[in-house]
Image (cartoon, rainbow, N blue to C red):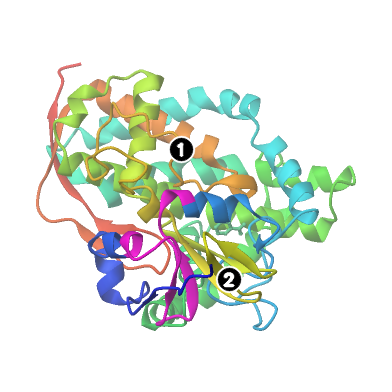
Amino acid sequence: MMSEIPRIAVDPFSEAFLSDPYAYHAELRDVGPVFWLEAIGAYGVARHDEVTQVLGNHDIFVSSRGVGLADFSREKPFRPPSLLLEADPPLHTRTRDLMNRIVALPVLRSLEPLWREKAKVLVDELLEHDGFDAVVDLAEEFPMRIFPDAVGLMEEGREHLLTYASIVFNAFGPRNKIFEDGMADAEEATAWVAEACKRENLKSDGWGEAVYQSADRGDCSHDEAERLVRSFLSAGVDTTVNGISNLLYAFTQFPDEWQKMDTSTSATRRAFNEGLRWRSTVQTFFRTVAEDTRIGDVDIKEGAKIITFLATANRDERRWDDPHTFDVTRNAAGHVGFGHGIHACLGQMVARMEADALLSAMREKIARIEADGPAVPRLNNTLCSMASVPVKIQKTGN
Ligand code: OVV
């Protein structure tokens, strides 16, 4: 028997929702396995089971028509589509393989000592004070000290990276005030990114040039290479910045967890995974329904958009014990903070290595971290983002 689909009024892109999405999550999970969002005219899934089901079924829930609210088969994309994020097989398979080779584990391992050293230097700088802003002084600072160098970006203008990424992530939502406000700085940042992706502006030893060398070997065209380098710039900075911000915010909310984490990679890895589960940086992504299908016993129509609430699934009590507790000893594997299926985060090893380097260096020298005043959210249509997380610390004596 076909079921009537629940309809809800909640607008997941309203300022009220984005200021505190967690206040609305239970309603999204409890209304049914799949629901219709009147405010945006799209289906939604918010439970862990259905989110992984949708993301795992990439032939029916496609990415090539956009992973935001807009359907690229009906609306002009906000920018030329990503050849990774906004692509389906077989194109996606080819670009993904190529990019996977560039950020493969041996490549990352060779950078690890440098990243660990840079993390120690930053932590020593922070320890000159009793407190600092975990966003401005730490989460924005660390990725910016290593990632643009790894890609081999030109030095001048790197500050545009954060502006550009926040525009890209806003553009997955509707053209609301948050999107329009962000667009104020769009022109300069977009022009800078376009320049930065060109081969002649990339250093000879970075991941950017490595993409062009793949093109030289015939794995993609040179135009495709330029667009693939853009993916590093779009997805590589704001995501890790906010992943680290959200993790530090988690520790301020559960300050006794810090002591339970030691400097080992197994401990820092677990903590970062749990941070992404507890407060997911990428809160939502859409798919487009490419043919009539069913979720449970609900009919889903071709051409519709469906929003997957990743952050909501990561707190689903059907999947997790005590889901609202940040617990660094939890095995959070299976969280969908990096997505799920063929589009699962390409850069997740990069992000994990950044987090391991930073957490290990911090835990060595810091015995306790606490909030030092209220944290300030930064509204974005897709990212759970922080403007400020003031913290005070106690040193270990190491
Ligand atoms: C995961 C992600 C976010 C934003 C942009 C892209 C990817 C891209 O491939 O450009």
Where is residue 307 drawn, in percent x and y?
49, 66
Q: Residue at x 45, y 80 (%)?
A: 40
Amino acid type for the residue under numbered disc 1: Gly
On screen, residue 386 above or below 175: above
Q: Nearer the viewer, residue 52 or 275?
A: 52
User: Residue 324, relative to residue 396: is it above or below?
Assistant: below
Helix or strand or loop: what does disc 2 sit on? strand
What residue does disc 1 label?
Answer: 334
Q: Which mark is residue 281?
A: none
Quick check: is the Cβ at mark 1 less than 8 Å away from ligand 1? no
Residue extending farthest right: 218
The residue that appears at 46% across and 82% down in the rendered structure is: 175
Q: Secondary structure at mark 1?
A: loop
* Relative depth, front residue between 110 and 117: 110
Residue at x 68%, y 50% (from the top left corner) = 202
Label 2 or label 1, whichever comes before in sequence order:
2
What residue is rendered at 29% in x and 52% in y? 136
Horizontal arrangement in the rendering, residue 151 relative to residue 352 (left or right): right
Q: Which mark is residue 300?
A: 2
Q: Position of residue 52 (x, y in %)?
A: 52, 49
Instruction: Read off the magenta span.
Output: 28-49
Whole-number angstrom distance, CA of label 2 to CA of label 1: 26 Å
